[in-house]
Amino acid sequence: MQGDGKIVAAGSTGTGSARDFALARYEGGDGPLDTVAPETSITSGPSGVTSDPTPTFAFSSSEPDSSFECRTDGGTFVGCSSPLTTVSLGAGAHTFQVRATDQAGNTDASPAARSFTVNPPGPPPPDTDGDGVPDSADRCPATAGLPSRAGCPSNAFSFVGKVLLKKGLTVLTLSVPGPGVVRGAQAGAGASQVGRASRRKPALVKPVRVLVGKAGKVKLKLRPSKAGAKVLRSKRSFPVKLRITYTPTGGKARSKVKKVKIKR
Ligand SMILES: [Ca+2]
Ligand SMILES: [Ca+2]
């Protein structure tokens, strides 16, 4: 009997060098006896802080066809297979351990272990208007808007087509991105200018205000004021700078200045 459990037989029935039978080493079907325990490895799964209260771990053994036993937070090892998803774990520190047992019954004496902390996500921050921009970062918290505009609706508008100038009337066509208000007035005068400056230099164009219900084209009609009409009686035309302002509902105003020549 050899150390590895195999039998070697040799012998002789006579004397001298004559032998009846020589060497016979028995090699059974089981191969060399395995006394080496497998090495267990955790191949994936959280370490450190995770928001997942039911983390999943994958593991492997250095020996093929091993079986595994797992345990979470101490307790007894129970049979498991890779990948393993833990039961729902409370917030705080946890440990996952796994050990492999090979086909010869050798169990890894030093189980593989992962320490991790479950920190489940808190409730999402409030978003009153539901536009995906939390109230704390939303500059228009009561109106659904765009993330690129800090939660405010777009105030980008443009002039479309030609400016119509006829008998003192100025017609501007605008394209607006949504509901709101469009205002037009002489730049540096009119309704937005209160006080001595506007008294000293009266607006030549009457301010107008148009409510817009939806995205699309808007016509803005501006007429000469009394002072403007007076100028038109003495001159065929006069130049004026118009300030056109679009304020989306619940959003921030944007203005553009347009130079036009008011004609008689
Ligand atoms: Ca919001
Ligand atoms: Ca908003």
Image (spheres, rainbow, N blue to C red):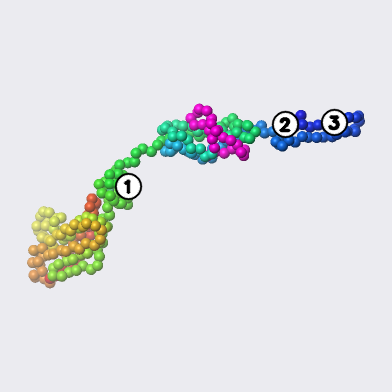
Residue under numbered circle 1: 132
Residue under numbered circle 3: 11
Which residue is rendered at x = 60% and y = 33% of the image?
A: 101
Residue 47 x/y as whole percent: 48, 37
Residue under numbered circle 2: 4
Give the residues in magenta. 58-81
Q: Closer to the N terminus: mark 1 or mark 2?
A: 2
Q: Secondary structure at mark 1?
A: loop
State which mark lies toward you, 3 or 2: 3
Image mark for residue 62: none
How crowded is the residue under tag 1: few (<14 C-alpha within 10 Å), some, or many (20+)? some
Q: Are marks 3 and 2 in contact (CB under 8 Å)?
A: no
Residue 195 x/y as whole percent: 11, 54
Hey, what amino acid is under mark 1?
Answer: Gly
Q: Closer to the N terminus: mark 3 or mark 2?
A: 2
Q: Secondary structure at mark 2?
A: loop
Residue 51: quadrant of the picture: top left
Which residue is rendered at x = 48% and y = 30% of the image?
A: 73
Depth check, front residue: 178 or 155: 178
Q: CA distance from mark 1 to mark 3?
A: 90 Å
Q: Are marks 1 and 2 in contact (CB under 8 Å)?
A: no
Left or right: 47, with 237 as reference point? right
